[in-house]
Image (spheres, rainbow, N blue to C red):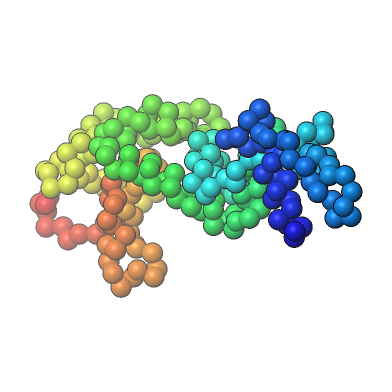
Amino acid sequence: MKKSATACVHRYYCCPTEEKPPERMDREPLQWVADGGVPKPLLQCVPGRLLGKDGEPLMQKRKMSPVQAMELCRENDALSEKDIWAFAEQLRENGDKGLIGYLMETNEARFAAKVAKAAGAKAERQRDKMTRVQILENAAGGAIRCTCAEPDECYHQMKAQLRRNSLDGPFQRLVYTALKVGRCKKEGSVALTGESDSGKTFLLRPLGIIYRAYKPPDPEKAGNYPLMTLPGKEVICFNDFAYEWDGKLP
Ligand SMILES: [Zn+2]
């Protein structure tokens, strides 16, 4: 019998699996020896690599399938290549080599990209079902955190900027209403005018952090197709918006 086939026989009769626990195994078979000597119990012929430290055959684990690997990574928030390796290594240290075994046999960069894509797709779908106001509430509830060295510094700066321009209150109301009613409604847009460097962009910047915002110009390559990146956006921010002034508001 070929060496690989012999190893299969040893595995089949001697190494338990998840479906076939040790107590359900038949370890009686004997191995006949080539020189015609006395047959030995098969268990005694099992190669060392199939045995654990205690001399007992190791439990065979079924190879992890791509879907199992993906689910495991997603459930444990291992979404980047680096995190996936770290997580696999942590499992290995705890005696579970399933994921690391899978990674060794796959293109891990491609696998990581798929895991991230699958996780992102779910988040995007959930997001698509949310209204702008819900997204705002979600951000305010902690989904987006202020990263200023002094907590809420940006908020206080914005409030001060609005107060200086007598806009504290009306500005927030107008922006909130525009977010709520959306396009095609009279209150659906807010125009902020003023001298350059007077803080207009600073006041509107959070919208670009909280929302998927369309900010022209479109990427360089899309130059021939204006508004190409507009689909799927939740707010539109026109900076330096130019119009002809006839003394009347549009
Ligand atoms: Zn801040």
Residue at the (23%, 46%) spot, across then down = 191
Q: In this view, does 33 lie to the left or right of 113?
A: right
In the image, is residue 57 above or below residue 64?
above
Q: Position of residue 117 (x, y in %)?
A: 45, 50
Residue at the (73%, 45%) spot, across then down = 10
The answer to whether residue 58 is visible is no
Q: In this view, does 233 lie to the left or right of 65?
A: left
Q: Position of residue 118 (x, y in %)?
A: 43, 47
The quadrant of the rendering that contains the N terminus is: bottom right
Task: Depth check: give the residue in front, 5 or 93.
Answer: 5
Task: Depth check: give the residue in front, 42 or 218.
Answer: 42
In the image, is residue 27 above or below residue 67?
above
Task: Depth check: give the residue in front, 143 or 70.
Answer: 70
Q: Is residue 45 left or right of residue 171?
A: right
Residue at the (46%, 28%) spot, across then down = 152
Q: How many marks?
A: 0
Residue at the (66%, 27%) spot, across then down = 23
Q: Where is residue 2 in the image (x, y as percent from the top left)?
A: 75, 60
State the residue lying farthest toward the bottom: 224
Q: Where is residue 194 in the image (x, y as percent from the top left)?
A: 29, 47
The answer to whether residue 33 is visible is yes
Task: Depth check: give the residue in front, 121 or 106.
Answer: 106
Quarter of the image for residue 216 reads bottom left
